[in-house]
Amino acid sequence: MQIVDAHEDIAWNVLALGRDVLRGVWETRRLEEGSDTTRHHGQCMVGLPEWLAGGVAVVVGTIFVAPAHSVSGPHLHTYYATAEEAHRLANAQMQTYRRLAERSERIELVEDQASLEDVLRSWEGEAPRVGIVLAMEGADPVRQPAEVEEWYRQGLRVVGLAWAAGSRYAGGDRRPGPLTAEGRELLRAMAAVGVVADLSHISEEAFWEVVERYDGPLVATHANPRAIVDGPRHLSDAMLHALAEREGVVGIVPYNRFLRPGWVRGDSREEVTLGHVAAAVDHVCQLVGDAAHVGLGSDFDGGFGAESSPTGIETVADLGKIAQVLAERGYAAEDIVAVMGGNWLRVLRTALPPD
Ligand SMILES: [Zn+2]
């Protein structure tokens, strides 16, 4: 079974936190013991050895930048005040992914169907490779809408118009608002190149406008059902239906705060189990009537660490345990394969250029 994780802020961890993702998680934790990084961002969960051990064949890696007004604390040098700064930071992240692929034979940037199949086939042999698909979380680094074409040429395949704090293009979950005129223009430019639109974090108002205006593929790489934890960060049943109708997929985030109402950082991990993850997956399946529109989008090391993940998930290598709880819940083998990665692979096979 091949696992696809639709959301990891890999380059941000490398550049902002100095984490070498080629290193194992336990080594990173040892190096970070007692550090500010662990205190603010949690215990590291992602590393190449863990992807390989856990059968994580494909990861959607973000180019994540956030406006400086939206954050506080350390690492402020990694945030932007202007589109130009956002562009520079995002470019550095793009280069970081290229360097990772150069440094390790076990990492391949997936830009087309041919390289995706190549990566998947590598798992039949002795030296499996992890494929990384590049996604932009918050589109401010695209200085003008037409520039999305250049980003696409460089390998970007998924674009989220806004992160939580919103962008020049759209409102976000913490800063509601519609699509702007530039946002509508960006959608037209995205449609022209055939990029996947990521609706995670976008404000509800802008969500519906994208659904109406965008003909290209729609997904939510990392969001959970509002029916489980309410709030603008998550998706209502109507939004989940809309995604499914468009053959989209939503990536469930195994983050305790998103799985159990009222859970806050510092609460016991024991209160949240793999069963909560299965319940979030199951909500989507029951709602839309099949297991074809939900997957995983861990967001591990994206603002939370192991202490905020369900009991039993210590690193990204444990994602496979979700398959076991789905089986215990009575899911058929082919549905489990779909949820663990097959659904994301369907989206990628449709959306990526042939070669
Ligand atoms: Zn996010």
Image (cartoon, rainbow, N blue to C red):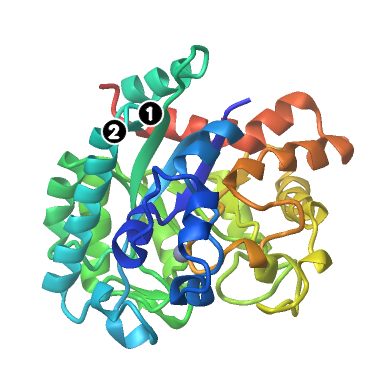
Kindly identify which numbered label has been placed on residue 111.
Answer: 2
Give the quadrant of residue 113. top left
Classify residue 293 as left or right of residue 105.
Answer: right
The CB of the residue at mark 2 lies under 8 Å from ligand 1: no
Q: Mark 2 belongs to which amino acid?
A: Glu
Residue drawn at (58%, 46%) of the image: 316
Q: Is residue 189 above or below residue 103?
A: below
Residue 240 at x, y percent in the picture: 62, 56
Residue 114 at x, y percent in the picture: 33, 20
Mark 1 = which residue?
Answer: 106
As rendered, which of 154 and 213 lies closer to the eye?
Answer: 154
As rendered, which of 41 and 230 lies closer to the eye?
Answer: 41
Residue 222 at x, y percent in the picture: 53, 57
Residue drawn at (22%, 77%) of the image: 80
- Residue 1, visible in the rendered structure: yes
Classify residue 262 as left or right of residue 34.
Answer: right
